[in-house]
Image: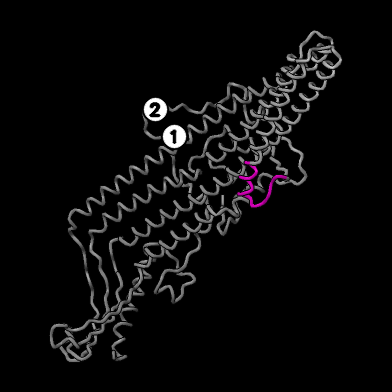
Amino acid sequence: MLKVRYFKYINLTLALSSCFSVMNCTYAEDSSWKNFSAKDLIRPRPDDSYKTINLANLSKFNVTAPNTPLPIVGQPETVTSGFSATNRMDISPLRNGEDQSLDLNQAVLLAIQRNPTIRQSIAELSQQSASIDVARASYYPSISAGMETGDLTSANKGEQVYTIKATQMLYDFGQVKASVDIEKAKLVAEQANVLVAVDEIATDTSRDVLAIRYYRNLVNIAQQQIKGMQRLYNIALLRANAGISSRADPVQAQSYVAYAQSYLITQQSSLRQTEQKLRTLLGFDVSQMKFTVSSDLVTQSGLYRPIQFNNIPQMIAAKAEIDVSSAQKEQTRKSIYPKISLVGSVSHAINGINPDSGKRNGTDPAVYLSVSSTFYQGGQVQAQLNAANYAEQAAQAKLDSTYLDVLNTTRTAQELIENTQRQIDILIQREKITHQTRELYEDQYKLGTRSILDLLSAEQSYQSARIEKEQAIYTIYDTIAQYISTTGKSRDVYQINNKNIQGVELQQ
């Protein structure tokens, strides 16, 4: 057995290595000596700060337009069309008449608190935080033990040599720090991915809520259309039975009733499908739930305010990929430098000669410095540098591509909303005109100066104008929801900031 007195060499090595490990961590990461404990000498201190995602810290980078031959048209200072978030977007909330009520923001919060996709992103974030500790562990001492036998083909095969070794890296020209920087950059990317997952679920929930309200309105219109067509059918039937009009009139009216009934079934089917999608997100039946949407939704979207590109999670993730590539390149450059370590070891032979001391059953303690470096690896270092350079270029291209995608989506959304708003103004007038035409044609039909087909067409035109108006309103709301997601404003608009989401706090 090893004698206790020989452990003083291991203890000396551990003491020295512990001092150097703390000095290395302090130098490399600017650590504080506050709340210092003995455990900090042998392993990294657990750090749960990754569970707080601060957008202000993540967005500390500048975004510039990429160098591209494509023309980039700037945002006009004034909107010449007269459409703006303040003077035109005065659309009242969509209507429905259910009893139970749930606000849009509440629905979004419920969805993100229970969605497994977000839980998966958070687990991956925790995994990456642990990877930082794995990288930081190289600052601390390592202890290994082993046993070797003698040559099994000789008379010395019964020999056994036991060895205990403690190693502490003293200086490595920043190689470990580069590894830590890589993992920290990856952590930022994972934090951005959590924000992306939150935004996606929030957007899906918001769009489903808006779609449910839209389809409920269409169902109401379809039901009114059936009543209107049925009323005209009854009038035509009475007049035909009285011999005042042709027997073909009720037949024509019946075909319009059938069309209206078919349209109702189509909208009811769309409504049920959307309700099932939202039920999956929220976890309960929403068929009897009334959803309310703030009339400030459009204003909060900041439709014509400057876009804060560095607040968009996809942009943050793309920038983090650039940082990862840069850190990998720096790590590769430093890998050719030597690593200086302090080593303490004790070997003890049993039933044979200790090859280190030359004594039978002898023990050999040692404390020494080790300097190691790989000067040539068959061109591996240069190949790794080339790979890191290409990865950095790809990450920059991804950032530029994300920038252009955001520009394209937001400009398209602005144009679509503006044109749709103008369309709504026309549809409102059309609804009024067709309503008057319907009443006028009915009076003329009773006088015999209009056919039943004119009356049915007028009824259908009136209902079609109402349907198209609802479609235009829904188009604006749905586009706004997508615009909010694209510009990274979901957490602000839906009031998710400064809340704990499945164990992670989202700070603005």
Q: Is residue 41 left or right of residue 82?
A: left
Q: Mark number for residue 404?
A: 1
User: Can you give x and y, in whole percent of width and height, for residue 105 in the image?
Assistant: 65, 46
Q: Does residue 64 sit above or below 322 in this rendering? A: above
User: Can you give x and y, in whole percent of width and height, for residue 317 in the image?
Assistant: 44, 47
Residue at 66%, 38% in the rendered image: 271
Q: Does residue 414 sit above or below 344 in this rendering? A: above
Magenta region:
273-287
Residue at 61%, 54% in the rendered image: 499
How far apart are the two marked residues, 2 and 1, measured between alpha carbons?
Answer: 10 Å
Q: Mark number for residue 501?
A: none
Label count reads: 2
Residue that mark 2 sits on? 70
- Give whichever of discs 2 and 1 has the lower sequence position: 2
| Viewer-closest of 19 and 6 | 6
Element on which disc 1 rests: helix
Question: Is residue 331 visible from the viewing direction of this image?
Answer: yes
| Viewer-closest of 358 and 467 | 467
User: Can you give x and y, in whole percent of width and height, for residue 372 in the image?
Assistant: 21, 67
Question: Is residue 109 visible from the viewing direction of this image?
Answer: no
Q: Amino acid at mark 1?
A: Leu
Circles 2 and 1 in contact, beta carbons < 8 Å: yes
Examine the image and state in which quarter residue 470 appears. Answer: top right
Q: Is residue 210 left or right of residue 440?
A: left
Q: Main secondary structure of the magenta part?
A: helix
Find the residue positioned furthest to the left: 154
